[in-house]
Image (spheres, helix red, strand yellow):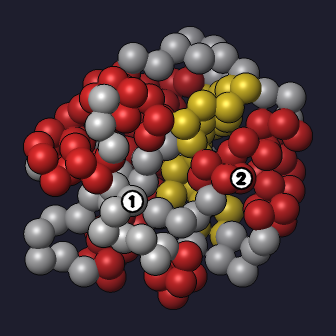
Amino acid sequence: MNRSNIILIGMPGSGKSTCGVLAAKALLKNFYDTDLLLQGLEQQRLQDIIDGRGIEYFISAEEKAILSLNLNATVIATGGSVIYSQKAMQHLQKMGKVIYLHLAFDTMVNRISNITTRGVVMKKGSSLADMYSERLPLYRKYADYVIDCSGDTVEQTVKKITEVIL
């Protein structure tokens, strides 16, 4: 498989979609958002999938969507929960370089005001802090590169992504 892709992983609010589309332009690549793929396949918003079918179903549907990808020369923005599927992450690793956009906890909290409607996978009774500490080691485990973008503007994060790749 061609490893010409750049896969962005990270917490909700880390800028995977926003920075991904701009990085794609800067790097002369296509852009693909797996959250939009999942919504299209399921014909529902992410939050409606979670609310209606549950977290296990969501993670399974996300894995299936990721495994269907066969892209080249593309910046791929993933859903924040993609790291819960080892199969999905191994597929993405074969497809390209995985970049983890790291956010400090406080920065994440400040950036995501719409937590109950944006389709964030959180176990019942879990706090944002619980989700953050559960995901952190998984993002690091799968990342080829880690970019700290806590204090960065979109432009600064895009610059860091392009510097890592070029």
Q: Quadrant of the C terminus?
A: top right
Q: Is residue 50 above or below residue 103?
A: above
Find residue 81 and name its label: none
Q: Position of residue 62 (x, y in %)?
A: 31, 35
Look at mark 2 in the image and give the residue it sits on: 19
Q: Give the mark nearest the N terminus, 1 or 2.
A: 2
Residue type beneath disc 1: Arg
Coordinates of residue 106 in the picture (x, y in percent): 51, 87
Left or right placement of residue 55 versus residue 40 in this view: left
Instruction: Choose between 11 and 116: the one closer to the eye.
Output: 116
Q: Is residue 72 left or right of residue 95?
A: right
Q: Residue at x 23, y 65 (%)?
A: 122
The nearer-to-camera label among 1 and 2 is 1
**Above-or-below relation of 50 to 104:** above
Label 1: which secondary element? loop
Q: Quadrant of the N terminus?
A: top right
Q: Which residue is mark 1?
A: 118
- Circle 2 Cα neighbour tier, 10 Å, few/some/many (<14 / 14–19 / ≥20): many
Using the image, determine if residue 100 lies above or below residue 114: above
Above or below: residue 17 compared with residue 86: below
Q: Residue at x 57, y 42 (%)?
A: 77
Disc 1 to disc 2, how far (Cα)? 18 Å
Which of the pair 8/19 is nearer the observer? Answer: 19
